[in-house]
Image: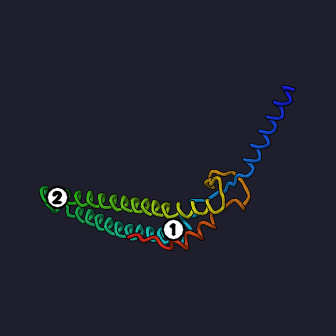
């Protein structure tokens, strides 16, 4: 009798816990796709890519100019006195250091803008995702990159992209 009561209690507990876990709704979300393929994300990517391209062209032109100055200076080495040559090389070194500093700060600024854009996007996605979770009684949302396999029906990425495009159509970067 004692064992049969334990058996029924354990069986009831297992059935109850299995049913509770069976009702859990778990979905996946591809955050990288969401950030890169929403209207705001695409706009931000295009803006940052254009800015990077413009900066690269500007610094490429500056680099060519500095190389030209260097070759001119080397050609004049025999004509100039040691003092004049030394002054010219020091001036050229300062220009090169300034060029490197500007280039580095430009890349840092772009990285900062990219991080800020990502932060803004995530802050806009969070309430949309929370609302969707509450409306659909979702228990858990997993990053798609951490999921090995599953049915396409559990992927909510396209739905969230659609909602994000409606509520946040552009990312204003400057």
Q: Position of residue 53 (x, y in %)?
A: 42, 69
Residue at mark 1: 41
- The quarter of the rendered structure image containing the C terminus is bottom left
- Name the residue located 57 percent from the left edge and 60 percent from the top edge: 130
- Residue 58 picture quarter: bottom left
Determine whether, in the image, residue 144 is placed left or right of residue 62: right
The image shows residue 17, relative to residue 156, as above or below, that is above
The image shows residue 116, relative to residue 165, as above or below, that is above
Q: Secondary structure at mark 1?
A: helix
Question: Could you classify mark 1 by the number of other residues whose Cα lies within 10 Å: few (under 14), some (14-19), or many (20 or more)?
Answer: many
Q: Position of residue 25 (x, y in %)?
A: 69, 55
- The quarter of the rendered structure image containing the N terminus is top right
Q: Position of residue 72 (x, y in %)?
A: 24, 66
Determine whether, in the image, residue 171 is placed left or right of residue 65: right
- Residue 155 picture quarter: bottom right
- Name the residue located 53 percent from the left edge and 72 percent from the top edge: 167
- Name the residue located 45 percent from the left edge and 68 percent from the top edge: 49
Depth check: 42 or 160 in front? 160
Farthest residue to the top: give it. Answer: 2
Residue at mark 2: 85
Depth check: 112 or 6 in front? 6
Sequence order check: which comes first, mark 1 or mark 2?
A: 1
Q: Secondary structure at mark 2?
A: helix
The disc placed on residue 30 is: none
* Image colouring: rainbow
Q: Position of residue 48 (x, y in %)?
A: 43, 67
């Amino acid at each position: 009798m004692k064992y049969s009561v334990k058996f029924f209690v354990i069986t009831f507990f297992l059935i109850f816990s299995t049913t509770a876990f069976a009702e859990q709704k778990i979905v996946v979300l591809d955050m990288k796709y969401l950030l890169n393929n929403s209207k705001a994300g695409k706009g931000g990517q295009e803006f940052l890519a254009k800015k990077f391209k413009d900066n690269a062209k500007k610094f490429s032109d500056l680099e060519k100019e500095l190389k030209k100055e260097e070759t001119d200076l080397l050609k004049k080495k025999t004509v100039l006195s040691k003092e004049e040559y030394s002054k010219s090389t020091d001036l050229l070194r300062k220009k090169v250091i300034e060029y490197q500093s500007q280039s580095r700060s430009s890349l840092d600024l772009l990285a900062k803008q990219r991080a800020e854009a990502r932060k803004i996007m995530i802050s806009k996605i969070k309430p949309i995702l929370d609302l969707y979770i509450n409306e659909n009684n979702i228990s858990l949302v997993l990053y798609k990159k951490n999921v090995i396999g599953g049915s396409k029906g559990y992927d909510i990425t396209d739905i969230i992209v659609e909602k994000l495009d409606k509520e946040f159509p552009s990312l204003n970067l400057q």
